[in-house]
Amino acid sequence: MRRPVIGVTTSRRSGWRIFPLVNLNLWIAGGRGQRWGAGRPADLDAVDGVIIGGGDDISPDLYGGTPVIGVRLDPARDALERRVAEEAVTRNIPILGICRGAQMLNVALGGDLDQDAWGTYGNANKIRTILPRRRIDVLDDTHLARIAGQEDMDVNALHSQAVCKLGEGLRVSARDENGMIQAVERVRDPFAIGVQWHPEHLFYARRQRALFRALVVAARARAEERDQASAVRDDLLGRA
């Protein structure tokens, strides 16, 4: 059985070091990654699933926010990832959003962001580390709970923004101890989960690997359905 192909959006600055780590997680889960980014082809016909990766803040122009001086933005990446998120949902392609990717999933579905999340929830509570030092509450009866377990989870934190108003068809699946949204998910198909942390840095943790495995399982199911439909179509054309 072939490995499902997962398109992975990356930053032009840090993609060269982050993509291999994401791809390692996908390989462990039974898939393989294909790197996307501004200036690189992003062909949704060529993949079975999508990861929208972490990186710079999303431009507030996309959700009616207020421009902030000194924040590093990447308009080309914003445009690419918004298109990828919107088309993936429309075409029933599974999605995993990582940090910025969770925020982009929310924005693409009509939600908005808290541009200064730590200011809102208290700078005294700010944690910025790739180590799992932020405790989050996984909410009952969510896809995230079924995938990674119901117990509280320790995660990392590298973000400055956070999901605020939810996009259409999304619900909250985790919050931290101060109430900040830490994960969102689609209520219905396609499979789509966005997490505020970086599970690719926590590949040694079973519950974090489970996120990549869930994406790969959903991508494999979609690929099999597509292959079966293609075989039926070819058979019908052969009989015509």
Image (spheres, rainbow, N blue to C red):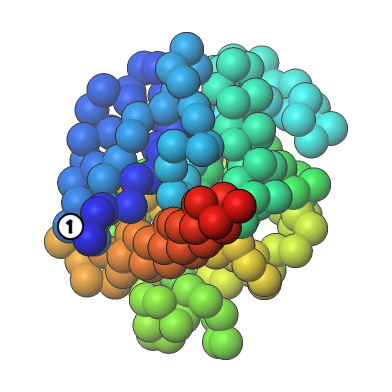
Secondary element at tag 1: helix
Q: Residue at x 44, y 83 (%)?
A: 146
- At horizontal 21% and vertical 35% (from top left) the residue drawn is 20
Residue located 44% across and 50% down the image: 48
> Which of the 4 image quadrants contains residue 33?
top left
> From where the camera sits, is residue 15 visible?
yes
Q: Residues within 10 Å of mark 1 (few under 14, many from 20)?
A: few
Task: Identify the residue position indicated by label 1 in the image.
Answer: 28
Picture quadrant where residue 128 is located:
top left
Viewer-side residue, 29 vs 205: 29
Q: Is residue 216 left or right of residue 52?
A: left
The one nearer the camera, 207 or 5, is 5
- Left or right: 111 in relation to 121: right
Residue drawn 46% across the image and 63% down it: 228
Q: Nearer the viewer, residue 99 or 25?
A: 25
Instruction: Using the image, determine if residue 163 lies above or below residue 12.
Output: below
Q: Amino acid at mark 1?
A: Ile
> Where in the figure is residue 166, as x and y percent of width and height?
75, 57
Closer to us: 91 or 214: 91
Residue extending farthest front: 240
Taking the image as shown, residue 49 lies to the left or right of residue 141, namely left
Q: Does residue 223 appear left or right of residue 17 in this picture?
A: right
Q: Report x, y in % for residue 80.
A: 59, 26
Q: Position of residue 130 (x, y in %)?
A: 28, 47
Instruction: Judge whether residue 94 can be spotted in this image.
Output: no
Number of numbered markers:
1
Residue 29, percent from left and from top: 24, 61
